[in-house]
């Protein structure tokens, strides 16, 4: 479970996050929507303890992230927009290294199974990742997350730049993980996929949560309309 | 966990083109230096032995003559190279390798390779020690500077930091991985050097070679450790790999070039050595004036009176020993304290200079290492001073023996003392002077002398590790 309680983050005198409350239950895929600079990445960074909150609390499975960062990180898996890997190591070596950092070890066959499950072509397993395309790198990143057997996933625009097929495979994988009881928080700009894959949607603006929706309750068109309304609120403010 | 990190770090390093080139250059230079050093060493041992044997024979074969003239004919002492001089030639290029030992005079050593060389040739004299002192740190810096800042730049640091690994584990793992990469390059070269040493023809002066090698290895390991952890500290501290490299190379240039030069200038300023001409003139004047202000001839007149009284005689002819020989020996002895005082003044100033330089080691770890390395290799000032002292002791003993023989064997000449009427001695007499043998200073004394330098190295290492831990613990992704 992921939980943000009155989470605030201030950079200098700029409030990037203004008291965010958020809860992602096991079996949830919570999609964070919002314009550029709304505070989505900031929220994810706070859960990862990459940055310290100005005030408020972020909790992973009930554990305060700031108090016990190592414990909470063990429960988390993180896939950024650009998965960064070691160019001189092969896909398998990268996967093995990160799995071990996360405290796991598997057989060669198991590592290969992770990569296969993420849809990486088998010819690439033993290739150095230097020449990998963004999509291939992203798949290794997903495999790393799978190997971590995390209770909660933090995904920051993980499919941006992926081709539709890869993107679709990724969504299916998320749905499988949801079925296994993972709590998934995903920042995205893809309203279509948010509706299709997500269980809940949160719309953020300027560091605030504007509205939360269950994807069951609304149609795709509704989501787009509500989203744009919130964004227009912004435009209206500037017009006034 | 740490070994996993180390293994990845190692794999990344050895697959990098940067590693292959720098490692190849390191190996090439080290092996060349060790081999040429070894060649020079065996050649110098051969030459030294041949020269010493030659001069010993010359002494015996000098032809029949008065024993005191034989003492004037003199003898040479040749400094044997220590077993590790092939690794670190220390100051031996500047100190001289042979001393002429003759009656009445204490001489400086001659045969200083550096004075026969151009500045370029001195640089060409790249020993194993120089390479390890200067290029090894650079090698470590090149392998390690991206450890943290490079990962920060490429973005892998975020991925790593999301995994739940502690910064300390990262630090130790990286240290181990880089350390192993350095070791697989350097250690085989050093082993080849050690192997060459064990095959060396003469290891007469190999007192405690095992201990020396052990201590040398420990000192160089500590030195490498200092640079390893400093590299990691700076890499953890800085945001960009380029900045890391600039800071580290700056420090390297400081400790390897700037600090030694500065230390040498500072020490010459605070502990000045007298100018040679003035020093020589002072000593001559002191000899004539007499050590305690009583001129030698006055002293000897006094001594003659006492001698006559002691033997109850009134003329030279009644003395039971050859008076001329007694006079020669006495005049010789009046000079001892003068020589001792003036020579030790120079030596003390050199020793004091070295201690000042060692103190600069607080700011630059290359300095204490350099001192330790020379000392253990037997090419430092202490070793040279011991050689000079041995030569002087030998010289005094040689003169005493000749004068003594003369004084006993020529008693009958007392009555008819004249320059044309003297005794002739032959090889058998000259043989009472044993051949010169150099006894290197004791290892324990050497270690005592350099205790402070070992402490300095240890402190540097502790500080470097402390700094690395501190920098690693404060790694933050807050501003990236
Ligand atoms: N290190 C920083 N220093 C100063 N301001 C920052 C820093 N990091 C983020 N911000 C600011 O915080 C705000 C929120 O940024 P954040 O990255 O969370 O937005 P986002 O919702 O992820 O946007 P995007 O959709 O573009 O990824 C932005 O205005 C950004 O400029
Ligand atoms: Mg973002």
Image (cartoon, coloured by chain):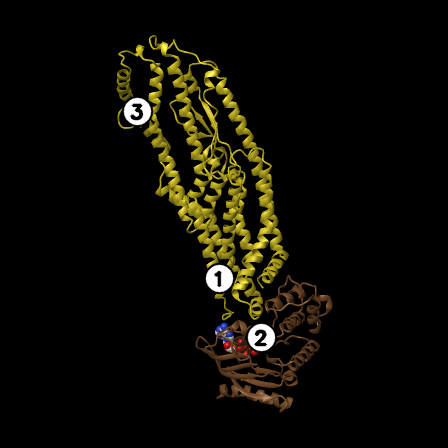
Q: What residue sits right under mark 2 in the picture?
A: A75
Who's the residue at 33% across and 13% down the image?
B320
Q: Quadrant of the N terminus of chain A?
A: bottom right
Circle nearer the N terminus (3, 1): 3
State whether residue B263 appears in this view. yes
Q: Position of residue A67 (x, y in %)?
A: 48, 74
Chain B: drawing colour:
yellow
Is disc 3 in contact with disc 2, using a CB cutoff of under 8 Å? no
Is disc 3 in contact with disc 1, using a CB cutoff of under 8 Å? no
Query: Could you tell me which secondary element the residue under label 2 belongs to?
Result: helix
Q: What residue sits right under mark 3 in the picture?
A: B288
Q: Position of residue B83 (x, y in %)?
A: 53, 37
State whether residue A188 appears in this view. no
Location of residue B316 by image quarter = top left
Could you tell me how far apart the alpha carbons at marks 2 and 1 are, in whole angstroms?
26 Å
Query: Could you tell me which secondary element the residue under label 1 belongs to?
Result: helix
Return the residue nearer the eye: B177 or B114. Answer: B177
Return the residue nearer the eye: B431 or B87. Answer: B431
Who's the residue at 56% across and 88% down the image?
A212
| Circle 1 residues within 10 Å: few <14, some 14–19, many ≥20 | some
Q: What residue sits right under mark 1 in the picture?
A: B469
Whether residue B236 is situated above or below residue A210 in the rendered picture: above
Whether residue B222 is situated above or below residue B294 in the rendered picture: below
Whether residue B112 is situated above or below residue A183 in the rendered picture: above
Who's the residue at 42% across and 51% down the image?
B363
The chain carrying label 2 is A
**Ligand number 2: quarter of image:** bottom right
User: Hey, which residue is sitting farthest bottom in the picture?
Assistant: A217
Q: Is residue B88 left or right of residue B7?
A: left
The mark closer to the camera, 3 or 2, is 2
């Amino acid at each position: 479970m992921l939980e943000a309680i009155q989470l605030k983050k201030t950079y200098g005198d700029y409030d990037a996050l203004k008291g965010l409350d958020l809860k992602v239950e096991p079996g949830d895929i919570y999609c964070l929507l919002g314009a550029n600079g709304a505070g989505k990445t900031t929220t994810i960074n706070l859960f990862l303890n990459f940055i310290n909150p100005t005030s408020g609390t972020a909790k992973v499975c009930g554990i305060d992230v700031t108090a016990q960062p190592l414990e909470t990180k063990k429960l988390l898996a993180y896939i950024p927009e650009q998965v960064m890997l070691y160019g001189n190591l092969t896909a398998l070596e990268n996967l093995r290294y990160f799995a071990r950092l996360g405290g796991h070890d598997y057989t060669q066959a198991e590592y290969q199974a992770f990569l296969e499950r993420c849809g990486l072509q088998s010819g690439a397993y033993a290739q150095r990742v230097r020449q990998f395309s963004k999509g291939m790198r992203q798949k290794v990143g997903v495999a790393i997350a799978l190997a971590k057997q995390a209770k909660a996933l933090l995904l920051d625009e993980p499919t941006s730049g992926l081709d539709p097929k890869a993107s679709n495979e990724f969504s299916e994988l998320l749905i499988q993980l949801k079925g296994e009881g993972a709590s998934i928080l995903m920042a995205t700009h893809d309203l279509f996929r948010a509706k299709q894959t997500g269980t809940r949607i949160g719309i953020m603006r300027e560091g605030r949560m504007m509205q939360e929706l269950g994807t069951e309750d609304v149609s795709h068109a509704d989501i787009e309309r509500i989203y744009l309304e919130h964004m227009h609120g912004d435009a209206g403010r500037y017009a006034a | 966990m740490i070994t996993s990190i180390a293994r990845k770090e190692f794999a990344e390093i050895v697959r990098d083109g940067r590693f292959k080139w720098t490692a190849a250059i390191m190996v090439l230079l080290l092996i060349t230096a060790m081999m040429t050093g070894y060649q020079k060493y065996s050649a110098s041992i051969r030459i030294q032995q041949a020269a010493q044997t030659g001069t010993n024979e010359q002494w015996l074969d000098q032809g029949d003559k008065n024993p005191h003239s034989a003492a004037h004919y003199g003898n040479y002492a040749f400094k044997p190279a220590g077993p590790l001089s092939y690794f670190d030639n220390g100051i031996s290029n500047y100190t001289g390798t042979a001393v002429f030992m003759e009656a009445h005079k204490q001489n400086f050593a001659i045969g200083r390779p550096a004075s026969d060389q151009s500045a370029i040739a001195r640089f060409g004299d790249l020993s194993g020690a120089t390479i390890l002192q200067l290029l090894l740190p650079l090698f470590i810096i090149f392998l390690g500077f991206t450890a943290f800042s490079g990962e920060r730049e490429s973005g892998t640091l975020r991925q790593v930091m999301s995994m739940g690994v502690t910064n300390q584990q990262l630090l130790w793992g990286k240290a181990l991985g880089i350390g192993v990469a350095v070791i697989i390059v350097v250690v085989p070269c050093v082993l080849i050097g050690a192997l060459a040493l064990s095959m060396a023809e003469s290891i007469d002066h190999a007192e405690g070679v095992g201990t020396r090698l052990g201590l040398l290895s420990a000192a160089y390991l500590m030195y490498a450790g200092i640079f390893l952890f400093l590299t990691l500290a700076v890499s953890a501290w800085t945001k960009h790999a380029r900045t890391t490299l600039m800071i580290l190379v700056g420090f390297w240039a400081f400790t390897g070039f700037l600090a030694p030069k500065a230390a040498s200038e500072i020490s010459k300023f605070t502990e000045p050595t007298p100018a040679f001409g003035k020093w020589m003139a002072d000593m001559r004047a002191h000899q004539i004036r007499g050590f305690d202000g009583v001129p030698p001839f006055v002293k000897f007149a006094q001594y003659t009176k006492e001698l006559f009284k002691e033997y109850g005689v009134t003329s030279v002819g009644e003395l039971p020993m050859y008076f001329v020989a007694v006079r020669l020996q006495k005049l010789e002895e009046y000079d001892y304290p003068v020589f001792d005082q003036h020579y030790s003044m120079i030596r003390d100033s050199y020793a004091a200079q070295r201690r000042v330089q060692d103190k600069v080691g607080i700011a630059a770890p290359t300095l204490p290492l350099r001192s330790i390395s020379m000392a253990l290799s037997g090419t430092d000032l202490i070793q040279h001073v011991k050689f000079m002292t041995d030569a002087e002791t030998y010289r005094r003993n040689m003169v005493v023996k000749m004068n003594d023989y003369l004084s006993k064997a020529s008693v009958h000449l007392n009555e008819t003392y004249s320059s044309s009427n003297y005794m002739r001695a032959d090889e058998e007499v000259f043989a009472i002077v044993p051949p010169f043998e150099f006894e290197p200073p004791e290892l324990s004394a050497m270690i005592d002398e350099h205790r402070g330098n070992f402490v300095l190295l240890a402190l540097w290492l502790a500080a470097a590790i402390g700094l690395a831990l501190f920098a690693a613990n404060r790694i933050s992704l807050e501003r990236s």
